[in-house]
Image (cartoon, grey):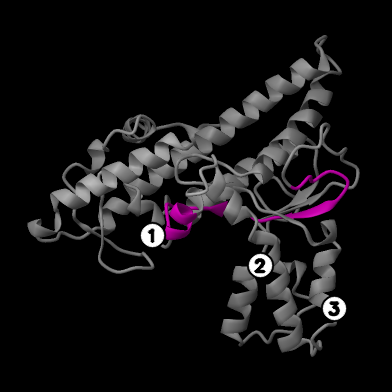
């Protein structure tokens, strides 16, 4: 798709990143302060890893724009597979924010309460898949077939939680760990909202939690994209379901084996998603450059550069 096309700087950045090479784009910027981060006094490293943790960087290519680009890509795939859904550029309803609005009596002027609900339980996509076949074989991840399902997309930088989970010595352990937190977060958020605004007593199921259970019995699909291009099983499950339905459509006029058509469709979807992720991280790094400030030379210590290099190569080997 046109929005996945690389510019020359972004392509160079992506290639250097894939081969664990210091980014030439950041050669003269190491040691500068990165803003819009949860921590203070965060400095630019040679590989741009710390920039990816700056989740609040504004602009058309910031972290939010990256998230929205993944949402749009998934919406296009669901549309190509004829899976009815809400949210995204190809849906009948661009927003999913209203799904809990009628069952949680939060006053409009309660800014904090609305923010908690929005941050903890606002799906990016809702698939209506009661007529969609389940995956064969089943595989891992939340299966959107035969159910209406919430999808909440997560982008994950190389945070402390990411590094801690990666010590499990399992490929993709960090994104899987993040994915496992999505469904419990929805339930705890809605349960608390029931108690605070609907008068639900402990041990009872309130209207907001009951609404959650209407969608895949409360299971939320939480596809996670990691800082090194890794993805969680829930994303693989969505792509697999879409590819099977796209293959069925193509099989009506192509004389090829169904399994061959499915693999071709799956390859296309994976390539499109890879380009979306690859282009998104590159654009985020380039977008962050104008917000950096100059620091004194003594902040650019050799020991810090060596530590960043060792950490980057360690996680690149674990993809």
What range is drawn magenta here?
142-164
Q: How crowded is mark 1: few (under 14 residues within 10 Å), some or many (20 or more)?
A: many
Pointers 2 and 1 in contact (CB under 8 A)? Answer: no
Residue 185: numbered disc: 2
Camera-near label (1 vs 3) is: 3
Residue 9 screen position, x and y as percent: 31, 34
Q: Residues within 10 Å of mark 3 (few under 14, many from 20)?
A: some
Residue 57: numbered disc: 1
Which of the two discs, 1 and 3, labels the residue nearer the N terminus?
1
Which of the two discs, 3 and 2, labels the residue nearer the N terminus?
2
Residue 54 screen position, x and y as percent: 38, 59
Q: Which element carries disc 3, helix, strand or loop? A: loop
Q: In the picture provided, is 58 more to the left or to the right than 211?
A: left
Residue 172 lies in what quarter of the image? top right
Q: In the picture provided, is 20 more to the left or to the right than 299?
A: right
Q: Which element carries disc 2, helix, strand or loop? A: helix
Query: Whole-Å distance between the Cαs marked 2 and 1?
Result: 25 Å
Q: Does 67 appear above or below 101?
A: above
Frontmost residue, 288 versus 225: 225
Residue 120 lies in what quarter of the image? bottom right
Q: Does 27 appear above or below 218?
A: above
In magenta stretch: residue 151: yes
In magenta stretch: residue 214: no
Seen at 83% across and 59% down, the residue is 215
Question: Which residue is disc 3 drawn over?
Answer: 205
């Amino acid at each position: 798709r046109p929005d996945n096309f690389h510019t020359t700087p972004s392509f160079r950045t992506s290639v250097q990143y894939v081969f664990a090479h210091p980014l030439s784009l950041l050669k003269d910027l190491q040691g500068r302060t990165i803003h819009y981060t949860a921590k203070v006094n965060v400095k630019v490293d040679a590989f741009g890893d710390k920039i990816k943790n700056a989740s609040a960087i504004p602009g058309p290519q910031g972290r939010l724009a990256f998230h929205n680009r993944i949402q749009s890509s998934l919406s296009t795939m669901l549309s190509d597979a004829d899976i009815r859904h809400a949210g995204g550029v190809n849906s009948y309803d661009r927003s999913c924010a209203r799904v809990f609005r009628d069952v949680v009596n939060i006053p409009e002027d309660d800014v904090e309460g609305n923010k908690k609900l929005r941050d903890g339980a606002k799906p990016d996509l809702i698939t209506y898949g009661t007529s969609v076949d389940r995956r064969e074989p089943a595989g891992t991840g939340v299966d959107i077939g035969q159910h209406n399902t919430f999808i909440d997309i997560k982008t994950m930088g190389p945070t402390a939680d990411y590094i801690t989970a990666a010590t499990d010595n399992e490929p993709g352990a960090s994104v899987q760990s993040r994915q496992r937190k999505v469904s419990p977060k929805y339930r705890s958020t809605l349960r608390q909202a029931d108690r605070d605004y609907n008068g639900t007593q402990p041990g009872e199921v309130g209207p907001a939690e009951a609404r959650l259970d209407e969608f895949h019995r409360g299971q939320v699909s939480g596809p996670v994209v990691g800082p090194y291009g890794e993805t969680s099983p829930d994303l693989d499950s969505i792509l697999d379901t879409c590819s099977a339905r796209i293959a069925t459509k193509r099989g009506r006029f192509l004389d090829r084996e169904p399994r061959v058509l499915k693999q071709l469709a799956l390859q296309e979807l994976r390539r499109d998603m890879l380009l979306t992720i690859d282009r998104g991280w590159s654009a985020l790094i380039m977008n962050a450059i104008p917000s950096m400030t100059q620091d004194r030379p003594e902040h650019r210590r050799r020991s810090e550069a060596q530590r960043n290099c060792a950490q980057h190569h360690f996680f690149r080997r674990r993809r």
